[in-house]
Image (cartoon, helix red, strand yellow):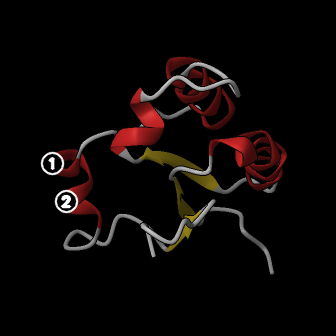
Amino acid sequence: MKLEGYNIGLAVTGSFCTFDKLVPEAEKLVQQKANVYPIFSTNAASIDTRFGKAEDWVRRFEEITGHDAIRTIADAEPIGPKKLMDILVIAPCTGKAL
């Protein structure tokens, strides 16, 4: 499937130990010319862990995608009603997010 031109929301939730595995996947989507928009849960955007500082992860995904991260519920609310995304990927998808 060609992803060029698709708007993909990449929603990053907890399970901090897997963030490094998501980086190459985000890079692959961008290489396929998809428009990737990082979306961070409150915890993913604010909790520093032994796997890295939250702000560093947010910045890294912003740099990969070329888009500012969506970090608040208010900023995320228009995604559905305005049909801003063609695909929403939740990764990692924790039990709480599910």
Q: Which residue shows up at 45% across the image and 76% down it?
A: 98
Q: Residues within 10 Å of mark 2 (few under 14, many from 20)?
A: few
Label total for image? 2
Which residue matches tag 2?
77
Asked if one can make out residue 70 in the rendered structure from this viewpoint, the answer is no
Q: Which residue shows up at 72% across the image and 68% down it?
A: 3
Name which quarter of the figure residue 56 lies in. top right
Q: Is residue 2 left or right of residue 98?
A: right
Q: Is residue 37 left or right of residue 25?
A: left
Q: Is residue 47 left or right of residue 59?
A: left
Which of the numbered marks, if any, corresponds to residue 74?
Answer: 1
Name which quarter of the figure residue 94 lies in. bottom right
Residue sitting at the far bottom: 1
Looking at the picture, tell me which residue is in the foreground, 30 or 52. Answer: 52
Residue 68 lies, with reference to residue 94, above or below; the image says above
Image quadrant where one finds the N terminus: bottom right
Residues tagged 1 and 2 counted as in contact (Cβ below 8 A): yes
Instruction: Give the image location of residue 4, x and y in percent.
Output: 71, 63
Q: Of the residues shown, which amino acid type is indicated by label 1?
A: Ala
Residue 8 lies, with reference to residue 30, above or below; the image says below
Asked if one can make out residue 23 in the rendered structure from this viewpoint, the answer is yes
Q: Which residue shows up at 61% across the image and 51% down it?
A: 15
Q: Residues within 10 Å of mark 1 (few under 14, many from 20)?
A: few
